[in-house]
Structure formats: C-alpha cells, structure tokens
Image (cartoon, rainbow, N blue to C red):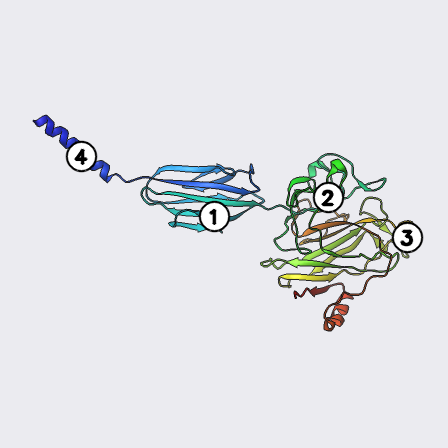
Amino acid sequence: MKQKLFVGVIICLIGLVNAQAPQLGTIIIEKQTEPDGSIQEFTFTGDISGTIKDGEQIIYTDMDAATYVSQETQPTGWELEYITCDQENVDISLLDKKVTIHLQEGQTIKCIFYNTLILPDLGDAPDPTNHAGNTMSAYSGVTANYPTVYDPATGLPQGPKHLKPRGDAWLGSWVSGEVDADLLPDEDGVTNINPASNTPDQDGSDDGLIQPIPTPHGTPSYFTYTVTIQPGAPGIARYVNVWFDWNRDGDWADTLTVSTPNDAPEWAVQNQLISSGLPPGTYVFATPLYMPYNPPGLSDKELWMRISIAEQTAPSPQDGRGPANAYEYGETEDYLIESEGEEPPPVPEYPSESIPFIAALMAIGITALRVRKK
C-alpha cells in the first residue's frame, strides 16, 4: 500500500513539473536576394548569428521567452531594401539593418532580410582590355583603344566606373547598371560590350544627349544634354566631361590643330561644373564651346564620343579613363555618332522669357534649363 502511494506521488510531481515547464520558441532569419540565386554570403551578428546565402536560413530552436537581436553586416555593393517578420512583437530597424525580437513562450518568429545588388555604371565603347582578351574595332580597319572595362586585371587604363549611379545625378532620364562593361549581371540583360562578337554600344539607357551633335570643322560648337538629379541627392558639385575621337584613330588621347596650335583637343569639354544647389528634377544643359576637328576626308565618317558626369574631375591623363578607385556617383555614356558638318543648332525652344537668361549663361558655359513636365 505504501509503495503504490509513493509511485502515485512521483507521477503527480512529474505532471506538475511538466505543467509548469515554459514552452520554448524558435527564431528563423532568412535571406532573399535580387538577383535571385546569388552566392554572396551575408553575416548576421548578435544573439541570432550566422552566415547565409540567398534562400538559406539561420534557425535557433529551444529558445526561452526573452528579447533577442540579430543584425546584418551589409556586403559592399549590396543594399538592404526591406525586412519582413511574420509576428508583430518585433522591432525592425532598416537603418541599423537589425531586428529586435521579443520572443514569447512557444512562439516561432521568422524574419526575412531582402537585399538588392546595386550594380555600378560603365561605358560601352569598344575596349581591347576585356575579360575575353579579344581586340575590338573602333571603325573598319581601326583597333579600338578606349578605356571602358574597369577591372585592372584585364589591363590598363581602367574605364570609368560609377559605384552608385542612382545615388545622386545621371545623364538622361534613367541609368542602368552592370557589374563590368563586358560581364553579367547587367540590368539591360546583355553586356555593354561583347568582345567575342566585336559588338559594343549595347547599354540600354544611354539617353542623355540631345542629338544631332554638331561637329563642323573649325567652327566653335556646343550641344545640349539632359541631367536628372535624384530626390535625396547629397547636394554636391558634379563635373561633366566630353571626348571626341576627332582623328578616328581609336582613342581619345590626341590634341589636334585647326587654326592655332592645339586648339582642338579630343578632351573637348573639360570639367564643366554642374551646380550643387539645384533641386531634384531633370534639366537641360548646354556645353561650353568646343573646337571640332573634322576636315575633308573625315567629315563623312562616324566617330566615337563619350560624355561623363561624376562628383570628381577627370583623372589624368584625360583620355576618357576613370579613377583607380572608381567614381562614387554619376554615369558614363558612349555614342558612335554620325558626323554633323552643319552649324550648331539654336538653343532649343523653351519659354521665351528664359532665352536671354540662357544666352547669358551659355557665354560662361553653365547653361541649365529645368525641364517642365506638362
């Protein structure tokens, strides 16, 4: 009788312990990336830590009810777009790239961190220093030597690379990104240049020029282009540079003579300043006057040109190359243009009251017109 009573007491005690034992919870941190399937590793620190790639999870089980923190260390070139959690008792800080989870008994909470690869911008003129090691043609029978590919391992000089092309200002209405001029991923779906097929000029968002571009031999000329300034732009000075391959020799490194020595440099527009005080919007600018070199025998031939906007002046030597550490902002656009021997066009039609002001500004090379949306 005593033995049965003893067993019964044990059973009751076990039941009491089980009834009072707290239910443990689970925390899941998941990674999702754009582009999908990225092999980039993302490290999380704090109470819920680990390293995962796209589609992978960090899972902590048997967790007591308490507050836990998990914070992402953002790799270079990636941006944390947003964080979602499937329960309300989570504080999300996108700025700090972290979640503070107030886990309750028996609860399972999953938070997903969504990251996007921020692709830089590069040009699309033909470049023999490419990853395939293939020569490329500037024109029929002329080898290209334009600096376009950035990767220094393929050979120097490095092409201009803009790390955050949509972070401040760009040319035209939009700018697309690519990991390098001849590599994928590329937001346009194709590489800017394809060395294997000798195909340049494939950047889908080169839309900054207002064409035609006047190039009458020996006549000082200008052209117009558009710039878009992003809302939230840092309010910095920007510099526009333009190169023309006047003598069609496959580079932008020459200084030619029309009437006085060295009056027609291929570096035609040199560090034109775009004001830091302009509010967000799209603007039309006119370049300072440049001297075209386009004599008979060349005037009917196409030529490569480059226009670039960035937060730095053009690095030396000024042959279209970019800085070794890349630009932070801006865009580079390359064009194979038809030679235009006619006189420069008049200032485009804008509200008549603006024309005297624009003419005065153009004399000192800082023309700007705000594009008015109808």
| Residue sitting at x 39%, y 50% | 88
Q: Residues within 10 Å of mark 3 (few under 14, many from 20)?
A: some
- Amino acid type, callout 1: Ile
Taking the image as shown, residue 121 lies to the left or right of residue 139, namely: left
Report if the CB atoms under discs 1 and 3 are less than 8 Å apart: no
- Amino acid type, callout 3: Pro
> Closer to the camera, 239 or 223?
223
Which one is in front in this view, the residue at disc 1 or the one at disc 3?
A: 1
- Going from the N terminus, do you reach mark 3 or mark 2 first? 2
Quote the CA–CA distance across marks 4 and 1: 45 Å
Q: Which residue is mark 3?
A: 295
Q: Which residue is mark 2?
A: 148
- Going from the N terminus, do you reach mark 3 or mark 4 first? 4
- Residue 208 vs 40, above or below: the answer is below
Taking the image as shown, residue 41 lies to the left or right of residue 256, namely: left
Query: Which residue reaches farthest bottom?
Result: 353
- Going from the N terminus, do you reach mark 2 or mark 4 first? 4
- Amino acid type, callout 4: Leu
Q: Secondary structure at mark 1?
A: strand
Q: Which residue is mark 1?
A: 83
Quote the CA–CA distance across marks 3 and 4: 104 Å
Q: Residues within 10 Å of mark 2 (few under 14, many from 20)?
A: many
Query: Which residue reaches farthest left?
Result: 1
- Amino acid type, callout 2: Thr
Quadrant in the picture for the N terminus: top left
Q: Which residue is mark 4?
A: 13
Q: In this orientation, does residue 218 appear?
A: yes
